[in-house]
Amino acid sequence: MTTIEHKIIRGSAEFRYAFSDPDQLKEWLNSVENFQGITFVGRSNVGKSSLINALFGNKTARTSKTPGRTREINIFTFSTSDGTKNGTTKNLYLIDLPGYGHANISKEMAQNWQKLIDTFFSNLPKTIGIINVQDARRPDQDIDKEFNNYIGSFDVTTFLVLNKIDKLKKQTEKSALEKQRVQIIHDYNWIKCLITTSAENGAGVSNLEREIISFLLPHHTSNNQQSR
Ligand SMILES: Nc1nc2c(ncn2[C@@H]2O[C@H](COP(=O)(O)OP(=O)(O)OP(=O)(O)O)[C@@H](O)[C@H]2O)c(=O)[nH]1
Ligand SMILES: [Mg+2]
């Protein structure tokens, strides 16, 4: 039996809204119908926006060498397709969150970030999957632990992505990551799966895409696609 595979339509993501005001965000979150999609979260500069571009097409999200570039919650809609005439799913949501743990911001901005993030998670339905991106060179930092415990309290589906694996050149670094991987899976037992990626050279991006599709469209995905 052949399985028809759904894919994200590259270039289909359309920018819809940017929120920096928690009250406006709350109002919008409570008004969306058929709210299905994914949201990217993670420490500043780990490559959330770059991964979004690798998955959705190059010019979707703004990336930067300066940490803390994404300041608002950016909301897009996108489509998937299985390549057949009636096989398109439209109006799925993609959300790019501003990164946590960025040191060089004012106290006022940090407080606003906290308020925005609290509003976001407290009003988020379970139909939105969380993609927590960390840096493969130094995963599970104290701030990552803190944030993971925080999202773990919301009972939402979470995928952990260790990005920038292209930067792990030495065998010792790769083996260290393998060890950490086992530890992380053990410690974060609410995580659905752990995927390693490089937004730079595309490694692992198709695995991440498969996981996203199987979360969004479980009926269209074969059972043997597992990566945990
Ligand atoms: N080598 C390498 N560089 C990467 C990778 N992913 C992202 N980068 C680089 O890391 C920097 C930060 O990437 P962004 O995608 O802007 O990071 P972000 O997580 O969205 O950052 P904020 O918006 O500040 O939270 C950029 O210079 C990217 O080119 C990767 O997989 N490998
Ligand atoms: Mg960003």
Image (spheres, helix red, strand yellow):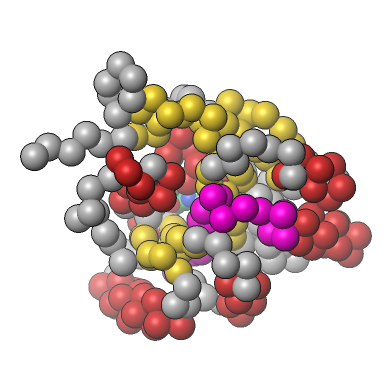
Please tell me whether residue 123 belongs to the stretch shown in magenta: yes
* Left or right, residue 154 beside residue 50: right
Task: Name the image quarter holding residue 93.
Answer: top right
User: Which residue extends farthest top?
Assistant: 85
The answer to whether one can see residue 6 in this image is: yes
Residue 220: percent from the left, percent from the top?
30, 40
Residue drawn at the location 34% of the way across and 34% of the way down: 7
* Left or right, residue 185 beside residue 32: left
Looking at the rendering, the stretch of residues picked out in magenta corresponds to 120-137
- Residue 187 vertical placement versus 56 (above, below): below
Residue 62: percent from the left, percent from the top?
61, 37
Quadrant for the N terminus, please.
Answer: top left
* Left or right, residue 123 beside residue 138: right
Residue 15: percent from the left, percent from the top?
63, 29
Residue 148: percent from the left, percent from the top?
58, 72
- Residue 130 vertical placement versus 140 (above, below): above
Residue drawn at the location 42% of the way across and 39% of the way down: 55
Quadrant for the C terminus, please.
Answer: bottom left
User: Which residue extends farthest left?
Assistant: 1
Task: Name the image quarter holding residue 153.
Answer: bottom right
Depth check, front residue: 114 or 61: 114
Residue drawn at the location 75% of the way across and 65% of the way down: 103
Task: Name the image quarter holding residue 126.
Answer: bottom right
* Left or right, residue 190 beside residue 123: left
Depth check, front residue: 210 or 146: 210
- Residue 176 vertical placement versus 7 (above, below): below
User: Which residue extends farthest right?
Assistant: 108
Depth check, front residue: 218 or 104: 218
Residue drawn at the location 59% of the way across and 60% of the way down: 42
The answer to whether one can see residue 144 in this image is: no
Please tell me whether residue 127 belongs to the stretch shown in magenta: yes
